[in-house]
Amino acid sequence: MPLTNVVPRLPVQNLAATRTFYTDVLGFRAGEDWPEEDPTFLILCFGEVEIQFYRAAQEVPTGEATLSFDATSVQELAQKLTPQVAIEWGPEVYSYGRREFAIRDPDGYLLIFSEETDDAPTCG
């Protein structure tokens, strides 16, 4: 059973706020909304990365998932995002050879941006 990809599908309280955050702040491209009149499902893409969101039928706990993105120029990305969103932690270089930082989306999901580096660790 060869697997080639995984696409997270996450519940959100407000699809419009999710769309705005991911497109305006992070630069994702809006894909399919369904149904057209009163969408309950949204696909967002950034290159080959796809995330699906659905409007929760009832209030559900959100923010209990972490999405980790491989990225380039993590330091630059953190600087670009700083005026628009609070940085949860980082950017720091970890002993396992990755520079990482994290933010939260409107539903509290932790988004980690990470890149390989040969730089010396800056934290424990």
Image: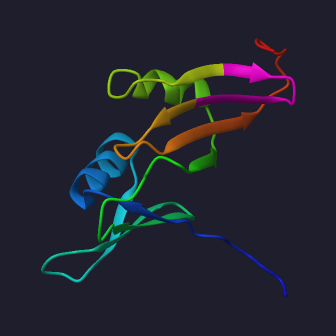
Residue 97 in the magenta stretch? The answer is: yes
Q: Give the range drawn in magenta.
A: 92-101
**Front one among 13 and 90:** 13
Query: What residue lies at 59% left-to-right and 39% top-to-bottom?
Result: 112
Query: What residue lies at 27% left-to-right and 74% top-to-bottom?
Result: 40
Q: Pinpoint residue 115: horizontal percent, then vertical percent.
A: 71, 36
Q: Main secondary structure of the magenta part?
A: strand
Q: In this view, does 89 lie above or below 42?
A: above
Q: Pinpoint residue 47: horizontal percent, then vertical percent.
A: 52, 60
Q: In this view, does 8 lie above or below 17?
A: below
Residue at the bottom extreme? 1
Q: Pinpoint residue 20: horizontal percent, then vertical percent.
A: 26, 50
Rendered image quadrant of residue 14: bottom left
Q: Pinpoint residue 26: horizontal percent, then vertical percent.
A: 40, 43
How many numbered tags mark residues here? 0
Rendered image quadrant of residue 119: top right
Residue at the left extreme? 37
Q: In which quarter of the image is the C terminus?
A: top right
Query: What residue lies at 34% left-to-right and 40% top-to-bottom?
Result: 25
Residue at the top extreme? 122
Residue 23 in the magenta stretch? The answer is: no
Q: Which colour scheme is used?
A: rainbow
Q: In which quarter of the image is the N terminus?
A: bottom right
Q: In this view, does 50 lie above or below 33?
A: above
